[in-house]
Image: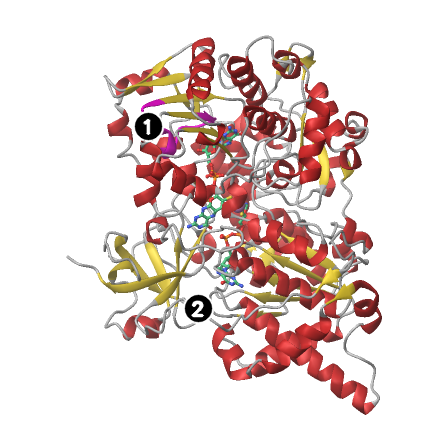
Amino acid sequence: MSKRGIRNYGGPAGGWGALKAVGQALQDQHTVVEGAMTLLHANQPDGFDCPGCAWPDPKHTSSFEFCENGAKAVAWEATSKRATPALFAAHTVTELRTWSDHALEDTGRLTEPMAYDPGSDRYLPISWDDAFAQVGVALRALDHPNQAEFYASGRASNEAAFLYQLLGRRFGTNNFPDCSNMCHEPTSVGLPDSIGLGKGSVTLEDFDHADLILSFGHNPGTNHPRMMATLREVARRGAGILVFNPLKERALERFASPQDPVEMATLGSTEIASRYYQPTLGGDAALVQGMMKALIAWDIEAAAAGRPPVLDHDFIAEHTLGFDALAADLSAQDWGDLERASGLARALIEEAARTYAEAKAVILCYGMGLTQHRNASSTVQQLVNLLLLRGNIGRAGAGICPLRGHSNVQGDRTVGVWEKPTEAFLAGMDGVFNFRSPREHGHTVVEAIAAMERGDARLFIGLGGNFAVAAPDPLRTFAALRRLDLCVHIATKLNRTHLLTGKASLLLPCLGRTEMDHQASGKQAVTVEDSMSMVHASRGLNPPASPHLKSEIAIVAGIGKAAFGATDPVDWDALAGDYDQIRELIAAVLPKQFADYNAKIRVPGGFRLPVAPSDRVWTTPSGKAHFLSFAATAGDPRQGDPQVLLLTTLRSHDQYNTTIYGQNDRYRGVFGRRDVVFAHADDLAARGLKDGDAIDLTAAFDASGERVVRRFTAIARDLPRGCLAAYYPETNGLVVLDDHDQRSGTPAYKSVPVRLRAAAS
Ligand SMILES: Nc1nc2c(c(=O)[nH]1)N[C@H]1C(S)=C(S)[C@@H](COP(=O)(O)OP(=O)(O)OC[C@H]3O[C@@H](n4cnc5c(=O)[nH]c(N)nc54)[C@H](O)[C@@H]3O)O[C@H]1N2
Ligand SMILES: Nc1nc2c(c(=O)[nH]1)N[C@H]1C(S)=C(S)[C@@H](COP(=O)(O)OP(=O)(O)OC[C@H]3O[C@@H](n4cnc5c(=O)[nH]c(N)nc54)[C@H](O)[C@@H]3O)O[C@H]1N2
Ligand SMILES: [Mo]
């Protein structure tokens, strides 16, 4: 009974299961014909950018590429279900709070602006004009601009994001907490010190020239499914793929392409990983340091024996600083410590290093398994060190490839949604808009929550997302939001954050990517930037889910006009009426990146932003790339307590962040449920437990005893001793707010110290 819905999944990822799942997703959202038509326009030159992920698509210029989870994302948005005022009349907010995250979003698309009425505990309809006026009044009533928080989720287009940051900066704050703070912030913080730019250096074409891919901490079969086509090509032409992941992810083992008639007809598949290493959670930095220690030692031996060098000394001399310090640091590291901290034996680390040393061109990919840890920014820098040692950056087939999350999270940052903007960006803003942007840095997500808790923040605007559920520590976060004077949510669907009402709350429904956007000057396109810095246009084709919807841009402009008045030098109406004008402003503020923006996006496929490291140009203060070291083996998240285990919190195959499409996680063999935790059988046995037992998880170092997840089922799986895995967001209650990467503020969602015991009955 307790192992209900748990099976072994024997097949490859992809294949017929993926096709079947798409049919089911369309059926569940009552959009079989329209949804299927919509899918044909995903990532097409005249179509919309798929909201599923930020992996680039060569097909922005050609034919349809099948993607199961892209299809789910599209079906979810193009659903025929509606959350109308009748839904809100029928249920109080208190009642809605008892619904599951899935049930809330499954009510369908929001159709009209709504305002919370504390008297009846219900959301009631409000006119757009009244809603905008209310936000304007509330903004003007604040004692200081820093009392407002402008949150953004990474789906917003460049145009919406640019206008949003203009609104916030015009108002006088840099408080732009965004989903990136919970995601790839260690990339944005770590990479600039190393290579001068917080973005990836490779293009899609580089994958054709690499002879080795290193894959750290990401699960592309679920989260970047279109990447599987690329990895499959790489594997089929005989290049190596080393996977470093504590969990055995099926898609990284075997994949069947739904686009390959032979593989489909013969039920065949392609082996993806040439070698699969299972380090301990958070062990990656020590693992990479072990690889580098081996490489440097072999290089010294080679020199002594007169053999060809292992390292690229010309590259190191011409392009880098800090090699000697790194080498000294690594030679002082103890192999025993590195083995313990990485969870891998020296022989395995050396094997990986040997494979790396023998490869001519290497791409290193990574995701949340790397970034959501206490030392994540420094860990990202170790990845760069490894590449620099052999000049594996800025040449064909080589470089660093962070897999971004939301489909435009990288673009939002490029156009200014950043709590720590550069002086150059602010100066650009000041020059174009003729006001002085604030210089004081703003809040990250974690800092914003703390500010709300203290009462220092009084107004929250969310441009998409599900702030409270995505953030750590609901115990503190939920309470913090409820203290606010006004919460404003710009959203497509109802979620729990909207139900954590402040003294006043507004729900402002917007168009999604798949929908047509008509404004004063006619039909509009927006633009987005993918993980590889390609910018292209996106045009929705479906009729809007409701005639009352406004575009995100129109809503931000509406707030701007209400806040600053009709005589404001920024002509908010004109910008909302013609997105070309917004792009002209972006180009004026960021001329190096966006000159001729409007012309360039009219070319199918768009254009690539300048990425200096791709050309071996390092925009660091020294003009060089930097080897950077840190003590990867110091510190113990278990604080020496053998009872403490580390928990990683992940996505199932049927979810998009806090959006839960369904209860299955096909490739991990979980069906119809999410209340499970994967553990090593010996860790269960050591606690008198076994596969299938009901268990409770508690935050290990929380004196309150209130951070508990109850009555989950333990499932024995192949993962390292001392490590657990469970789904996000159900386990966010175990993540303490202050437990984050010190440099980037990114919560340590992937190494949460917990205790596991039999469920209290
Ligand atoms: N369908 C779908 N697509 C998505 C999303 C979604 O939720 N659903 N979310 C989008 C977003 S915002 C993001 S950021 C990306 C997320 O994409 P991923 O980065 O793939 O996200 P996770 O599911 O968190 O998976 C992390 C992977 O890292 C591994 N891992 C965990 N801890 C460690 C560790 O300490 N070391 C190593 N080496 N590996 C570890 C896990 O086993 C897992 O395979 O996907 C984007 N695309
Ligand atoms: N424990 C744990 N926590 C995590 C993570 C983890 O791995 N583990 N991952 C973190 C990561 S990487 C991220 S990026 C965050 C995600 O944090 P968010 O980006 O805040 O969350 P989402 O779940 O993507 O937001 C879903 C909501 O966005 C709204 N929405 C959808 N499409 C649109 C649109 O087109 N426009 C507008 N305006 N709204 C829209 C809908 O109302 C929907 O309910 O979560 C983080 N939290
Ligand atoms: Mo993300």
Q: Which residue is mark 2?
A: 719
Q: Amino acid at mark 2?
A: Leu
Per the image, label 1 sits on a secondary structure element best described as loop
Write the residue at 28% across / 64% down.
756
Residue at the extreme left:
761
Taking the image as shown, residue 94 lies to the left or right of residue 71, namely: left
- Establish if 727 lies above or below 580: below
Viewer-proximal residue, 363 or 546? 363
Residue picked out by circle 1? 501
Q: Is residue 658 visible?
A: yes
Based on the displayed image, in which of its 4 quarters is residue 306 positioned?
bottom right
- State the image quarter where residue 414 is shown: top right
Report the residue at 81% width, 58% height from top: 396
Badge 1 amino acid: Thr
Q: Position of residue 171 (x, y in %)?
A: 54, 24
Q: How far apart are the two marked residues, 2 and 1, measured between alpha carbons?
A: 41 Å
Is 659 placed left or right of 3 in the picture? Answer: right
Image position of 67 (left or right of 27):
right
Q: List x then y, in percent, for residue 69.
A: 54, 43
Please determine whether, in this image, residue 531 is positioned above or below residue 509: below
x then y, percent, for residue 575: 65, 16
Query: What is the span of residues highlighted in magenta in the rendered image?
Result: 489-504
Check the picture and name the quadrant holding the C terminus: bottom left
Q: Is residue 239 visible?
A: no
Front residue of this view, candidates 715 and 215? 215
Q: Is residue 500 magenta?
A: yes
